[in-house]
Image (cartoon, rainbow, N blue to C red):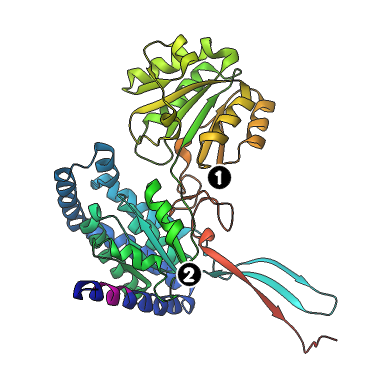
């Protein structure tokens, strides 16, 4: 290993040790102190807006020169309104109930032992993410709210923006008397830093959360030597049932696909019930086309709407993050559930119907982290769930599932209080 490699390994090892000290400081902190830190972070982000936006403009310029796609540029872009949204999201996290120390259950045994299950921080959480600089602020706020130290490794395309946001985070920590080691950001674009995090940094990392494309998540899940909370791509479906109201279905599908095509909650596949496809598909397709969306359909859908491009097998498993949607005609709720099970990612799926029994059947059959009835998939967002913000949408089935907020970043321990009992 050359000197640069040695230096990076030493830097990352020091980051892990510092994070462990930060986690200890947070375990000893009070809920009010954590609230003060998060509130001060939001204030610092507003005060530092000019520096953050200037850094973001530089990142955008570099990314355009590197040939980054328009949807990816949109993901990383910050303007005054978006940055204010970041600050508001941080403030919302400050306002939610502090989960640390909350008793989720308490009971007394016949022998007099008092047993409580109490929420406790996980410890040190490493978050590896791409593109979205708001994750830097969201993750910092959520980790502090839940009493966890954070190691943040954003994408190289947002290196300057993330560093600027982190400077505001550190100011917030200092204002509340907490050390900067509570939230650290990896300031190198060297991909070897990711490998160092995946090694567990000498067992200083308790949980790794990847938030990015399929290749990033696959690498983390394959190589990580610490537990991983998975976040797969959003291969999201909207199923329009034969009993759907046409106007409602049109509006929901249009919003689910086109509100923001670059978010993980965007719909990527439209499923139409065969029993009413000839009635339902034309107005929905027309609305999408008028909004600038490209449609890629199977043979039955193209027979109804010939302007569609033929869909390939790859279309059913592609997260476009662009104004493109695949379309398939399916046989009722069972056909929709079968398609989703075969091609979905377990992220977010929706049904549009006026038939309550059909909705209940869809809910029972579709095993995704988020299942919606008569609502847009774009509601797959921690802020919309009332969590203040999120680190991602977990598609795993253990520990946490769906939007990952502060409560989902805690574990628990049992506290047993006795009066001198001994076991016979």
Q: Is residue 345 left or right of residue 73?
A: right
Sequence-first tag of 1 and 2? 2
Residue 274, image x and y in percent? Answer: 57, 16
In this rendering, the answer to whether 7 lies above or below 249 is below
Residue 388 seen in the current view: yes
Q: Nearer the viewer, residue 53 or 408?
A: 408
In this rendering, the answer to whether 33 lies above or below 328 is below
Q: Is residue 134 left or right of residue 156?
A: right
Mark 2, residue position: 206
Residue 160, image x and y in percent? Answer: 20, 58
Point 16% across, 53% down: residue = 54
Q: Secondary structure at mark 1?
A: loop
Point 19% across, 47% down: residue = 63
Mark 1 surroundings within 10 Å by alpha-carbon count, few (fewer than 14), some (14 through 19), many (20 or more): many
Q: Nearer the viewer, residue 377 or 303?
A: 303
> Could you give the CA–CA distance between mark 1 and mark 2, rounded to whole angstroms?
23 Å
The magenta segment: 8-12
Q: Nearer the viewer, residue 97 or 245?
A: 245
Q: Secondary structure at mark 2?
A: loop
Point 85% across, 86% down: residue = 424
Q: Is residue 53 left or right of residue 200?
A: left
Mark 1, residue position: 369
């Amino acid at each position: 290993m050359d000197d640069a490699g040695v230096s990076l390994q030493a830097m990352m090892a020091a980051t892990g040790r510092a994070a462990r000290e930060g986690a200890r400081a947070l375990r000893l902190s009070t809920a009010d102190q954590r609230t003060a830190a998060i509130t001060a972070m939001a204030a610092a982000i507003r005060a530092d807006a000019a520096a953050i936006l200037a850094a973001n403009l530089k990142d955008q310029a570099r990314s355009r020169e590197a040939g980054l796609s328009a949807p990816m540029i949109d993901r990383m872009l910050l303007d005054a309104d978006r940055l204010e949204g970041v600050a508001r999201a941080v403030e919302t996290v400050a306002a939610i109930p502090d989960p640390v120390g909350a008793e989720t259950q308490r009971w007394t045994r016949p022998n007099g032992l008092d047993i409580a299950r109490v929420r406790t921080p996980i410890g040190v959480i490493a978050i590896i993410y791409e593109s979205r600089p708001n994750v830097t602020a969201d993750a910092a706020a959520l980790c502090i709210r839940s009493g966890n130290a954070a190691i943040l490794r954003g994408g190289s395309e947002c290196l300057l923006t993330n560093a600027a946001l982190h400077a505001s985070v550190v100011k917030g920590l200092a204002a509340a008397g907490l050390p900067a080691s509570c939230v650290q950001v990896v300031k190198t674009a060297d991909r070897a830093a990711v490998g160092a995090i995946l090694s567990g940094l000498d067992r200083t990392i308790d949980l790794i959360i990847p938030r990015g494309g399929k290749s990033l998540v696959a690498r983390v899940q394959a190589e990580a030597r610490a537990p991983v909370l998975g976040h797969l791509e959003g291969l999201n479906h909207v199923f329009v049932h034969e009993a759907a109201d046409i106007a409602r279905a049109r509006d929901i599908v249009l919003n689910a696909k086109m509100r923001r095509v670059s978010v993980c909650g965007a719909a990527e596949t439209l499923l139409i019930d065969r029993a009413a496809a000839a009635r339902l598909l034309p107005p929905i397709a027309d609305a999408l086309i008028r909004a600038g969306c490209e449609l890629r359909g199977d043979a039955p859908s193209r027979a109804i709407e010939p302007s569609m491009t033929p869909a390939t097998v790859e279309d059913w498993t592609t997260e476009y993050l662009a104004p493109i949607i695949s379309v398939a005609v399916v046989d009722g709720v069972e056909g929709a559930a079968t398609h989703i099970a075969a091609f979905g990612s377990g992220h977010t799926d929706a049904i549009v119907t006026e038939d309550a029994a059909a909705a209940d059947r869809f809910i029972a059959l579709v095993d995704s982290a988020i299942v919606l009835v008569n609502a847009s998939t774009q509601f797959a967002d921690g802020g919309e769930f009332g969590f203040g913000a999120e680190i991602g949408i977990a598609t795993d089935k253990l520990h946490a599932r769906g939007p990952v907020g502060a409560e989902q970043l805690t574990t628990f321990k049992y506290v047993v209080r006795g009066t001198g009992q001994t076991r016979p």
